Image (cartoon, helix red, strand yellow):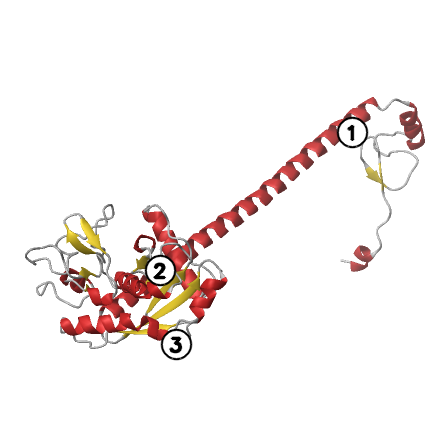
Amino acid sequence: YDQTEYEKPPERFIICPQCGFQQLPSEDCQQCGIIFSKYFEKNETEEPEIDAAAQISKEMEQGIEKAKMIAMISTMKNRKRYDLRKILRWTRIGLLVLLFIAVGLYTAWTNWRVAGWDKTLEVVVYPINGDQSEQTEEFISTLDTEDFRPVETFMIEEATRYEFQLKKPISIHLAPVIGTLPPEPPKNRNPFVVMLWSLQMRYWAFMNNTYEKSLDIRLYVIYKAIENTEPQLEVSVGLRKGLIGIVNTSPASKAQDYTNIIITHEMLHTLGATDKYDYTTLMPNHPDGYADAEKKPLYPQNHGEIMAVRIPKSPDSFSMPKSLNNIIIGEKTCTEIKWCSEEES
């Protein structure tokens, strides 16, 4: 075939406005026979009722299609936003789960390591100015490690009395002052609230460490100027998970001996020891809260048990110990902190 025929530029065509026939330029339609000039004159003079209605219908259809398109786009955007929120939500949940797992594994490993007593535990005391007063700040500036040495001595003496394998169970250290207060312990004992506070406390402890060397147990001593110079056992706390203790006390030299008692009490909580006194009457529980549960006559007791603190003087009265010299570790507590076996106690 002759290829040149298909390479010629196309001729211009016109379309009949009435029948739609396509033809070469001409004055009339070669199919329906209308004369183009007369056809357009006629349409310009007539009222375009049909064309207007068609135009309105067409515009309505276009409006509907546009509305559908807008709705579809809006739905897609909302779906994307919803999907993003859903992804972020599950991401947060996943991170929290990983955090709980990591904290749980670290806590389990730490407790296992500490409970093994294969080395001397490094116990660090962190002083905190609880009322931001100059009096408290001045008192804290006078503290040194020797003020807390009786805690270390007490643990050594009790380990010797129980013939424990480790001659020096703990080594006490004093850290620089911390400028912020820890999260307040919850007033109710709701398990979820306590767990949340425990996590907050461990995070706070991690972020507020002023001690540069390695450590095992953190004890935060909050000093506040109060009328009662004796530390308040009921507002102090010890966490086994995290090995953290909090002691509230007064910035007074005469309170230091009793402060050391509460420090030891809360430290033993972190090692697994439990309270051995009645939370309502504050009386030591018999026999575990008594230093000599088989003494005859039973009263008055001469010493107190560290996890009961108080010294029973009669069935319904007690006295407060003056120092750790008036306190011992009872057999039940010895078992709880893994110094003694069940058979020995």
Q: For numbered disc 2, what is the local secondary structure? A: strand
Q: Position of residue 298 (x, y in %)?
A: 9, 55
- Residue 342 visible here: yes
Q: For numbered disc 3, what is the local secondary structure? A: loop
Question: Residue drawn at (32%, 71%), measured in percent from left and top?
Answer: 148
- Mark 2 burial class by Cα count in 10 Å: few <14, some 14-19, many 20+: many
Q: Quadrant where the C terminus lies?
A: bottom left
Q: Position of residue 221 (x, y in %)?
A: 38, 63
- Mark 3 burial class by Cα count in 10 Å: few <14, some 14-19, many 20+: few
Residue at the spot of label 2: 246
Question: Residue drawn at (27%, 72%), measured in percent from left and top?
Answer: 152
Residue at the spot of label 1: 55
- Of marks 3 and 2, the one in the foreground: 2
Going by the numbered disc 3, the residue's amino acid type is Lys
Going by the numbered disc 2, the residue's amino acid type is Ile
Callouts 1 and 3 close, C-beta under 8 Å: no
Going by the numbered disc 1, the residue's amino acid type is Gln
- Of marks 1 and 2, the one in the foreground: 2
Which label number is shown at residue 317? Answer: none
Which quadrant would residue 166 be assigned to in this image? bottom left
> How much space separates mark 1 and mark 2, taking CA atoms?
83 Å
> How much space separates mark 1 and mark 3, taking CA atoms?
85 Å
Question: Residue drawn at (81%, 57%), measured in percent from left and top?
Answer: 7
Q: Is residue 222 left or right of residue 34?
A: left
